[in-house]
Image: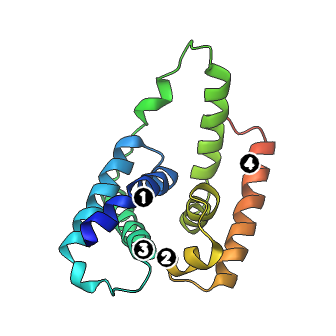
Amino acid sequence: MLATDIASLLPRMRRFARAITFHREDADDLVQVAMERALGRSEQWTPGTRLDSWMFRIMKNAWIDEVRSRARRADLFVPEEAGEHVGDDSAHAHQQRLAIQKAVAMLSEEHRLVVGLVLIDGMAYKEASEALEIPIGTLTSRLARAREALQQLLSDGTKA
């Protein structure tokens, strides 16, 4: 039953993972790690509580672990998709998407998390605050600052 409920969250989990990782393979890995952790620790979930908040919290923590691990290894990777559309008719749209991705990537980790949950996944403020384990006021102020930062970065002509 729990595995089926978690599986129904896969599209949202993948969308959130893409929002915070900016790399298709990293997003897939993050979703897989979250699924493994959730299924391996299913006794920690309290029936009757929001499964999606629990899963997004697992994903957030798994991504923080991965970022810290990468920082220790000092490995930097350029996303493969950065060169996928060279010479394509959709190059302009692709450049815009890359500019937005770059601007979002320049945000702090806490701002990327709220942008990923609220603006990209469309999660309600209350749900997002529960998933991130922060007060709703903190979430709204982070989101406002993240929006301002994005507008500033994009108006400055940030290009990928």
Dot placed on the residue nearer the N-terminal end, 4 or 1: 1
Distance in Å between CA atoms under marks 2 and 4: 27 Å
Distance in Å between CA atoms under marks 3 and 2: 5 Å
Tell me, for residue 153, which label it has, or none.
Answer: 4
Categorize mark 1 by other alpha carbons within 10 Å: few (<14), some (14-19), many (20+).
Answer: many
Element under disc 3? helix
Distance in Å between CA atoms under marks 3 and 1: 11 Å
Q: Position of residue 158 (x, y in %)?
A: 71, 39
Q: Position of residue 30 (x, y in %)?
A: 34, 56
Amino acid type indicated by mark 1: Met
Which residue is labeled 2 in the image? Answer: 131
Which residue is labeled 3 in the image? Answer: 57
Dot placed on the residue nearer the N-terminal end, 3 or 2: 3
Disc 2 to disc 4: CB gap under 8 Å:
no
Q: Quadrant of residue 65?
A: bottom left
Element under disc 1? helix
Q: Quadrant of residue 38?
A: bottom left
